[in-house]
Amino acid sequence: MKKLLTTILSLGLAASAALAANPAITAVKVSDSLDTIKADSAAWSKAKFETVILYPQTAIEFNDKKANALVANAKGKKAQVAALHDGKNIAIMVKWADKTKDVEQCMSSDVYTDGFAVQFAGATKKAQPLPYIGMGSEGRPVVVHLQKATAKVYEPNGNKDVSTQINRQQTGVFGKELADFDAKVASLANTDYERVFVGEGFRSLTEVKDKSIKSNGAMVHGPAGWSGTLSRPLKDEYVNLNGTVPVSIAVWDGSSMGRNGLKNLSSWVAINLEGQKANSAMVGELTTDAKGDAAKGKEAAATNGCTGCHQMTAADAPSLLGPSLKNVGGYSTAEYLRESILKPSAVVVPGYNRNAHANTPWYNIEKGKRVSTMTDFSFLDKATVDDIVAYLKTLKSEVE
C-alpha cells in the first residue's frame, strides 16, 4: 500500500510539474516601425500568440482582511502573449480575461485599478543568472514597465494648470461657461498612466523620471477583457535585448483590490527575436521541466525543515517565519529556487510580515548587509537539491 501511495504521489507531482514551463514566444520581425504601435495596429495580424500562465503572488499576506478574503482562493490566469520586433524596437501584447473595468480615478483611497506590467532583465557586463522577479538582484538589475487603466481627473496632466485642478462643482460657473470648463479639462487631461522603474535588489525599485527610457504603453478593454501593449527600444542604457529576451508579465485586478504584491505574475518567459540567434541555454532553462524527483523532493523538504518556516501548500497553516511558497513554483525559475537553497542571502526579499514576532526576522544586518536568517543548505548533495527544486516547481494554484 505504501508503495502504491508513493507511486500515485509521484504521478501527481509529475503531472503538476508539467504545468511549470511556459512556451518560448517568437517575436516576429516586421518592416513596420513599432515605436508607436497600438492594440489595433495591423502589424499584430502577423504575431504568434502563446499561452502564458500568471500565478497569484502569495509570498507575503497583506495586512488587509478584505483583500486577503478576496484572493484567498485565487487561481492562476491564462494570458495570451505575442511579440514583434523591427530590428530597433520590440513590441509585446498581453491579453487576459477580466470582465470588470476598474480604472484609476484619484477620488477614493479604496478604489483599485486594473493594470499590467512587463519586466526585462537589465544589461550587465557579463552573463549572469536571471534576477529576482519584481525588484531585481544585487548586480542583476531589472526594468519594469507599468501601465494602469485610468480615467480623466481634475488634475489633468501634471503641468500645474491651476485653473483646471479644481472640482467642477467648485468653479462657480454654470451653463455654457461650465461646459467650456469641462471641455478645457478634457483637452488637457492625460489618461495615460505609464511608469518605468529600475531595480537592483531589496527596496531599490526607483521610477525613471528623466525620460532616458522611451516606451509606449496602452490598455484597451473589450468584451473578453484587456489587451495591453508595450513597445520600447531593444537597446538603451538599461537593456541590451538580442537573441533571446527574458520577460516577466504581471496583471492586477482592481475588483479584487489588486495592488503592489496582490497580483498575478509569470516566471521569466523566453522571447526569441526572429532572424537572430537564440540563446539555447536560456530557452532550455525557461521552457523545460525541472530535473529531479518531485516526490523525493517533498520528503527532503520536510526532512530538512523547509516546512517549519514556510507554508508549502494552501492546506498548510500560514507561517510567519518565512515567505509562503504555495505558488513559488508558478513564478520562479528552477535556477532561482536552486540559488535560494544554496545561497539564501543572494536575494533577500522584502519582509518580514509585520504580524510576525520580533524575534523571528527574515534577515539580520551584518557589516551593513542584509543576511537571510534561512539556513545555508549548500551542504546538500546535488541530487537532493534537484529533487527539492523539482518539488518546489509543483507548488502552484490551479489555473482558471
Image (cartoon, rainbow, N blue to C red):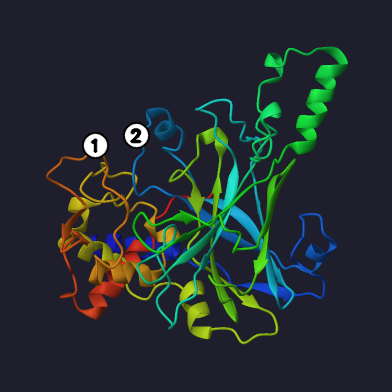
Which label belongs to residue 355? 1
- Between residues 61 and 166, which one lies in front from this camera angle? 166
Residue to which mark 2 is pinned: 63
Amino acid found under the numbered disc labelled 1: Asn
Relative vertical location of residue 158 with respect to residue 393 in this rendering, above or below: above
Q: Is there any visible trace of residue 33 in the rendered image?
A: yes
Relative vertical location of residue 224 with respect to residue 184 in this rendering, above or below: below
- Between residues 292 and 230, which one lies in front from this camera angle? 230
Outermost residue on the right side: it is: 176
Residue at 49% from the left image edge and 66% from the top image edge: 268
Q: Is there any visible trace of residue 18 in the rendered image?
A: no
Residue at 46% from the left image edge and 55% from the top image edge: 206
The answer to whether residue 345 is left or right of residue 9 is: left
Asked where in the image residue 333 lies, by quadrant, the reply is bottom left
Position in image of residue 399 (x %, y %):
52, 51
Tag 2 near tag 1, CB within 8 Å: yes
Q: How many labels does the image show?
A: 2
Position in image of residue 125 (x %, y %):
44, 82
- Between residues 64 and 309, which one lies in front from this camera angle? 64
Dot 1 falls on a residue whose secondary structure is loop
Residue at 69% from the left image edge and 64% from the top image edge: 49
Amino acid found under the numbered disc labelled 2: Asn
Residue at 58% from the left image edge and 76% from the top image edge: 241
Quarter of the N terminus within the rendering: bottom left
Outermost residue on the bottom side: it is: 277
Relative vertical location of residue 169 with respect to residue 250 in this rendering, above or below: above
